[in-house]
Amino acid sequence: MSRVFVPALLAAILCGSSARADEGMWLLNQPPRKLLEERYKFTVEPAWLERVQKASIRFNNGGSGSFVSPDGLIVTNHHIGADALQKLGSKDRNLYRDGYYAPTRDQELKCPDLELNVLQSIDDVTPAVQAAVTPGMTPAQALAARRAVIARIEKEAQAASGLRCDVVTLYHGGLYHLYRYQKYTDVRLVMAPEHDIAFFGGDADNFEYPRYDLDVCFFRAYANGKPVKTENYLPWSATGPKEGDLVFVSGHPGTTNRLETLARLEHRRDHVLPSTLQRLRFLEALLLQFSERDPEYARMAKGDLFRVANGRKALSGQYQGLLDPAILKAKAKIEQQVRGPFEANLARDRSSPWKLIAGVQRQYAEFERLHDLLERGDAFESRLFRIARHLVRLADELPKDDAQRLPEYRSAGIESLKFQLFSPAPIPAALERVKLAGSLSFLAENLGGAHPLVVKVLAGKGPAARAADLVNGSRLADPQVRRRLFDDGKKSVATSTDAMIQLARLIDDEARKLRTRHAELQETERQAYAAISKALFDSYGTSVPPDATFTLRLAFGVVKGYDEDGKKIPFTTTIGGAFERADRQENRAPFALPKRWLDGKDKLDLATPFNFVSTADTIGGNSGSPVLNRQGELVGINFDRNRHGLVRNFVYTEVQARHVSVHCLAVLEALRKLYDAGPLVKELLH
Amino acid sequence: MSRVFVPALLAAILCGSSARADEGMWLLNQPPRKLLEERYKFTVEPAWLERVQKASIRFNNGGSGSFVSPDGLIVTNHHIGADALQKLGSKDRNLYRDGYYAPTRDQELKCPDLELNVLQSIDDVTPAVQAAVTPGMTPAQALAARRAVIARIEKEAQAASGLRCDVVTLYHGGLYHLYRYQKYTDVRLVMAPEHDIAFFGGDADNFEYPRYDLDVCFFRAYANGKPVKTENYLPWSATGPKEGDLVFVSGHPGTTNRLETLARLEHRRDHVLPSTLQRLRFLEALLLQFSERDPEYARMAKGDLFRVANGRKALSGQYQGLLDPAILKAKAKIEQQVRGPFEANLARDRSSPWKLIAGVQRQYAEFERLHDLLERGDAFESRLFRIARHLVRLADELPKDDAQRLPEYRSAGIESLKFQLFSPAPIPAALERVKLAGSLSFLAENLGGAHPLVVKVLAGKGPAARAADLVNGSRLADPQVRRRLFDDGKKSVATSTDAMIQLARLIDDEARKLRTRHAELQETERQAYAAISKALFDSYGTSVPPDATFTLRLAFGVVKGYDEDGKKIPFTTTIGGAFERADRQENRAPFALPKRWLDGKDKLDLATPFNFVSTADTIGGNSGSPVLNRQGELVGINFDRNRHGLVRNFVYTEVQARHVSVHCLAVLEALRKLYDAGPLVKELLH
């Protein structure tokens, strides 16, 4: 990580041309046609692009997937299906650990609260959104104006189309696009392998390569009780990629920070990441200790534990990147190329947007930790608490005009929110108690035991006793109770004696104040980024794609290996390699292969490719994305990056950085030889 | 933990009598004769006391033990022997995990750097030490004067006796006693069971009860190449304790904070504990992740991992105690009983010692984190770094007069220091690199990436690259290299190109400044505590024992069970219980019994008592302490407290709090039936 990177933006700026490397998470309405034509002689045909777009699926719990049959069959990662697997499981049925296969449709299991979105169309609404904010408005006025216009656009679009409609902020405020989604809420589990092969190598191998993971999971979308019929699906490749092949990744990268200013990145380095890492370590320790106490506790905590450990490892990699002087030096150089001329020509009475953003960071630093504890909820790690807060706020917000509501309660999103809120998924009390006790303690660690807020929240108890009172004193684990409170609205919530509702009420004024302060600063940032983006567009057009926003993007790259510590790392691993690695690690967790694999070894063609890498530009949220060849066939399922790719939040590099995918042939081999899943293979290869 | 405690000191103060509960870690020269006589009709005979004292052993790596045969045989905990087991192990011989038994003396394995101390005599040197500090001295002058007088006393005593001599500060500055120790540095491993039965239940069951741990380890002390002969050993009881029996614990409790002021406890709650917990969680995560990567890494990191996880759990319990309003309320009440009258009678021109101490805490808060990072070494988790710092400082300190040296370099302790410094124990480079990289990153997390110190220490690299440079650029893993640098002294160290020596030099000025500032504040605190102690002694004599100081203490208590959540917890568990617990936990780690135990189950009398509890007052450092009956026979080996005992740092309670011991009969049963250790059993029962 001490190499000096030449990121695409730097290249673009220094060479005055468009990106040279395979960088870019491109908007579907602004695909890199010229680049692909010039570099790979690939023409983006409209029909190809439309099929890719409408076959790509957003998993609202934070991942991607795709349709792989005309009957609504979907493939994603096991670790994206994990939340559903966990919620479908019980003490006597550990689906997450043991896997599942439904040979017939009637054995497919309906997920309690999984919502999928499929992008149908995009419109640029930038002029309307930017026109709402006029010079001279205070940040509070600007925020209200922008919220109002976005609420109106979404509501009208939804009414007109019947689709889920979201206005997406791009370039941190440079562009606003309206996305319309087809929504699926009847999603059923078809097949999942065992956790131990889906996540073979566990945390140790996470963000590493070579890998040997069958990180796949199959679902099926239903509508009106029948499997969804679609023309837009990706045929399963019968061969897979060769070294040097051009491939595409179509998915939903979550967040990148490549267009953020240096001051913002320094704030990430010195505030956001240290405090987030501290929190993740505390949560990970807590969950590990809880899991060790009992096998059933381990089952309950497995999903949280993966999420937290994965985040900790990804953010540690980002933090290391920001501590690498080479990276921030490169960012400083890039920034100066745009900032220098801009500030030189700036009218005397105008502020530099870079300085504005730096000023905002200093203000964040004053209260961000308190904001995160109270408003983001770091102090209240509990599903019951999150439900309680929604109920308290819904009672306040729903009577308001759409334009005045907090964004998450606007009409456009309310159905999706209710789908989550009334989910029948179980909420294990033991896990709730231990997480809440831990996070109340974390609150005190951060603010000090005598802080008025700590005293108020703990209410004269220690954290463990207080958490027990709150969880035992709440009936919100019952979805009927939630629904009644929701239906009864303000009065019922205001007088509720439910302990968790009372906690949410107790801190709501203060939490809302922090949120307002935070949102107004964000509004100031957005306006500053709008000015910076304009300067960028004036010079470079849209040759620099926007930062990731968990919306659909198209990336491309080449399947190829790389060198590490003087060794060649081939572009693909084999199924046989998994057995060798398990042997070397004495078959102990997390390198213990499932019994089915150990017993079935002789049936397998060990030379079958297992995982492979390409240079395409991905980030967290891309998990489960289909990897396509020129023909638009699915050749792999993206599930990870290697550690060299952990700095991709800030800079793209392809010297060693790769994303990692499950090879299409490994899936077929395992389904056929080990999982006895003939019907599924037949559907994939129909 | 939400019960209101009636600690002994409160009882003593409120009732005007001596402690009522079984509280107290008593000085061997001030045993609770009257208490034992009145409450248990037990007379402390001088011969009994002398034998207990001289059979009790301090393990300088942080634990306790005792002689159990006339031929220098020693019993302690497996987790106290762990450091030696780890250092004696190698890639091909995992003694820590697999255990060891030497049926003959020539198979006993010499530990590379284990030093044992046995207390021979105590003298009160309070008048001499306190006379050295005169009114009107600045803290710096007082500190120098006190250091000088202590150095002189230790040096003279050592010259006169040939023994290791330490002046011990009691009552945080109220008394000063001179302790003379017989020292043993040729210590050999005799027997250790497998880690999985020594620490059955692992972190999950640590600080819990019921327990099923064979947490024992046998060593033998040698002198001049022959086993040490001693009359002062503890006969192994052939029956063990019954419920209600009076027992004694003779060992080396490390630290308690019961006599600290409220302001100091609040400082612990709001500064010391949160920052220490944050550091321990970071280290634990790092070590767990390192261990997962490779079985050999797991072996390397095992010792560190236990130490860190154990500390994290103990300190979490302390932190929870300080967040419990009942405990601090009780402390406030106690404090006011002494402080109220004292301050009421205080001359106008004198400061209240309680206020002085509160002021010192505020000053600590300003720089303590930086002090801990730089001077305590939190930023440089590396054995090589600690060696480098010693070499750099020894070169500076040894030429000075004894009275001017930093305390750890005074002549009285120099031989023990050299024994550690030149230890041939291996220092695994992979572990060094990962710990150092992590702690350099931790430094940046705490201070920010642009802090001058971070920039200086990282020297233009990221943490991982810098750590690799430092470890790879140091030859200090070779004890010969260390010895040469030590022998050559100042000039050689000052010009050394060893990367780790250079790092230690780079930060030494700043680290020393922080240390001086810290030590002068401690001196102010000591004087304030001297005044408080005087008030305490005037009213209550020595009926309140001093806080623990990792010196020999005698505790007493009663063997008895307790109630928890409406259930009776019996005073003892059985060997059969271990098998039941393993079954319920699906025999998965940390509840996996060793193969020897699973295979040998039928040979065992499952009704044999395994672990037992008593009310005696113990704390960390007491691990390995012998538990004795009235006759002075060893009935158990203390190894833990239950979680109710975690608040004992601050208050003694015996409602549910218990210390946990291995039963003497469990040891005999396992040695006989499973470990084929006839000669060892014979020596114990000779």
Image (cartoon, coloured by chain):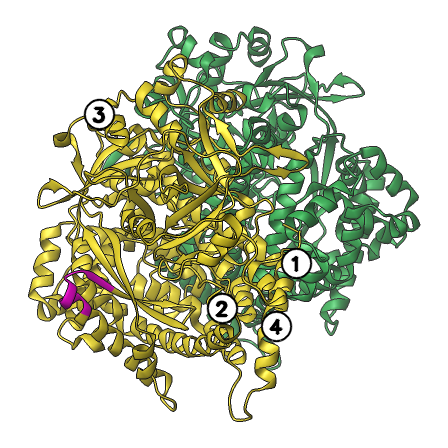
Chain colours: A yellow, B green
Quadrant of the rendered structure where residue A335 is? bottom right
For marks 2 and 3, give the CA distance: 82 Å
Task: Say which chain tag 3 marks.
Answer: A
For marks 4 and 1, give the CA distance: 17 Å
Residue type, mark 3 in image: Pro
From this viewpoint, is residue B21 visible?
A: no
Of the numbered discs 4 and 1, the one sitting upstream in the chain is: 1
Q: Which residue is disc 2 drawn over?
A: B339
Q: Residue at x 49, y 71 (%)?
A: A365
Q: Residues within 10 Å of mark 1 (few under 14, many from 20)?
A: some
Task: Say which chain tag 2 marks.
Answer: B
For marks 2 and 1, give the CA distance: 58 Å
Of the numbered discs 4 and 3, the one sitting upstream in the chain is: 4
Q: Nearer the viewer, mark 2 or mark 1?
A: 1
Q: Residue B111 at what x, y percent from top left?
A: 70, 25
Contact check, label 4 and label 1, Cβ < 8 Å:
no
For marks 4 and 2, give the CA distance: 66 Å
Q: Residue at x 41, y 73 (%)?
A: A174
Q: Residue A175 at what x, y percent from top left?
A: 38, 71
Q: Residue A412 at what x, y percent from top left?
A: 19, 66
Magenta part of the chain: A157-165
| Residue B430 appears left or right of B327 | right
Is B91 within the magenta? Answer: no
Q: Which residue is disc 3 drawn over?
A: A679
Q: Nearer the viewer, mark 4 or mark 1?
A: 4
